[in-house]
Structure formats: C-alpha cells, structure tokens
Amino acid sequence: MPHSFPRPRPSILGRLARSSVAALAFVALASPLAAQPARAPLARASNGFSAERLARVDRFLQQYVDSNRIGGAVALVLRDGQVAYQKSVGWIDRESRRPMTADALFRIASQSKAITSTAVLMLVEEGKIALGDPVSRFIPAYARTTVASRADSGRTIVPARRQITIQDLLTHTAGISYGGESWIADRYVAKGLGPAAGNGWYTADKTEPVCETMERLASLPFISQPGEAYVYGYNTDILGCVVERASGLALDEFILGSLRANLTCVRVIHGRGRHSHKKQPILKDAIQRWLCSRRLGRHVIAYTSARLCDGGGGAVYILLRS
C-alpha cells in the first residue's frame, strides 16, 4: 500500500537551474558592459569528451594506486557504443610487479547494490527523493539512532550527532556495518540480524518484508557517527525500503518495471587467448543456466521462495528469474 509523504523537494536539477538563472541575472546587473576576454576552448578528444578533464581521471586513479588505497584499476567509458575512455593503472599482482592490463579479470560481487542505488537515483531525478533527505522522511525509526564504541566495560552507546541521509547510505558513510563487531554482535543476534542472518548476513532470503527488517535495524547501535567513516554494511538494504516507500511499489516491482527494459549485459567468452563480446539481454535464460552450472547461483536460488529482493541482495536474481 503506497505511503503518503510530505511534498517532495524540487529535484537537484530544478534547484540548480533556478540558482543558475539567479546567478546570471546578478552577473548581468553587476558586470560592466565592456566585453570580457573569451576563455580558450577545452581540447576535445575525437569522441567529444574534454581531453583535459579525462586527464583528471588519469590522475585520480593513479593517486589511489600511489597512496596504496588500491592495487590497480581499469576504467572504461562507452559513448554510443564506442570506447570514449579506457585506462589501466597499477598492478594485477603488485608482489610480482605484473602491471594492470585492460583485459584483466575482476571478481565483482554484491551488484544488487548497484541496481538499488540506480533505482534511488531515478527517484532523485523524479523529485521524489533528495540526496540530502534524512532517511527518517521515509523510515521514521531512523530519526534517532545510536552509535556504539568499544570501552573497558565492553561498549559505550551514545546518540548519533545528526540524522543519517540518503547520501550517507549511497556512499556507505552512515556508520552502519553488518553487526559482526564483537562489541555489538550480541545485540544484532538478538534481533535476528548480523551473524544471526546467515551466510553473508543476507536478508533477501527471508520472508519478512524489507521495511520491517530495516525498522528493526534502526533500534540497534551503529559503529560510527554519520558521515565520519566508510563502513560497509546494511546501507543499501535500507535504501531498498526507501525505494518502496518513495515509489509506492515493492522493490522487485520497481526494478522490473523501471530498470528491466533498459538493461543489457556483455557476456565475455574466453578461449585460446581471444575474447568474444556479444551484447544480449540480461534476462536471457541462458545466462541463468550459465550461472547455476558454475554453482554461482547457490545463494541466489534460495530467493525463489522468499521475498526476492532487499536492496542489498537478490536484485540480480530478480532480473534473471523474470
């Protein structure tokens, strides 16, 4: 049943447009009539991107390697099906000094989070969610949260200094973990979360509606103040509930209705040193069989008798199953 909320804030683009108009009006009134010197145009790459700005991406990636935040990375930007930017930095194997290559293979997990985050940004575009919104606008239980820290007596719990925002959840800076830390694990187990939720702390394989689970989570202490540290945890599961409340649809219904038609995947077949790239719909039955034949769908299959998706897990299976 759809929830009713306060009137949505204007979209980010709308606010920027209005502020830009105001700024232009001010400049027109305050600037002298003398012609201003023209800025030199930015150099353009053949694909239409600014070569100068793409060089910033090069520097950004290299800084991450040089500061030992990552071992290596490959960045790729496509425009109209053509490669607009591609860069390899760092190492495939730092210890053996093997440099990163564009065709390196990476293990990518937890891609339900990318799908759910895309759903959130679609709702931001529609003006139904703002990045600065407190999560309590959609889940009132998050109006007052707490933070636990280790102490001589075991733990100390204090109120959060501010409310958690949508942006905090998207960037995993809300201070919310999976509840496995020794000083809070018992609290999470008592609520059926953290270690008690099973392998990977999944909640998508449970029958309880995602919003009920996330409301219960709000009563537990988190491990960092909002905005102060990167903490990987239930952030995107909470966003799954936000999508439901903001859209008035179950998360799996929103994903299928709004995302499915636009999703394609590239299946890469490796053999004899050659790569064959074939673009095909992500909902292809063959992909599901391919996953299961390699035992990659072991946890995913459990979702067939459950609620299918919680935001942090299950979304990829929804797309395959449909």
Image (cartoon, rainbow, N blue to C red):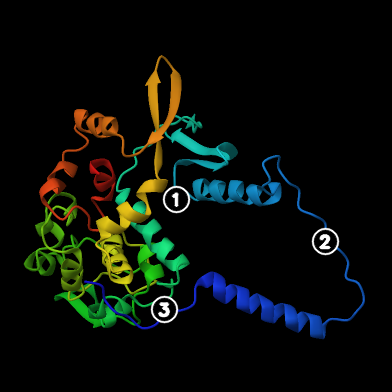
- Mark closest to the chain's N terminus, 2 or 3: 3
Distance from disc 1 to disc 2, alpha carbons, whole Å, reads 36 Å
Distance from disc 2 to disc 3, alpha carbons, whole Å, reads 39 Å
Q: Residue 88: give x, y in percent of width and height.
A: 53, 37
Residue on which the image places disc 3: 8
Look at the picture and state if 137 lies above or below 262.
Answer: below
The answer to whether residue 23 is visible is: yes
Residue on which the image places disc 2: 39
In this rendering, which labeled residue sits more in front, label 2 or label 3? 3
Question: Are circles 2 and 3 on residues that touch, CB within 8 Å?
Answer: no
Residue on which the image places disc 1: 69
Image quarter of the N terminus:
bottom left
Look at the picture and state if 234 lies above or below 127.
Answer: above
Q: Amino acid at mark 3?
A: Pro
Horizontal relation, residue 309 to residue 61: left or right = left
Question: Are circles 1 and 2 on residues that touch, CB within 8 Å?
Answer: no
Question: Are circles 1 and 3 on residues that touch, CB within 8 Å?
Answer: no
Residue occupying the point 14% across, 46% down: 304
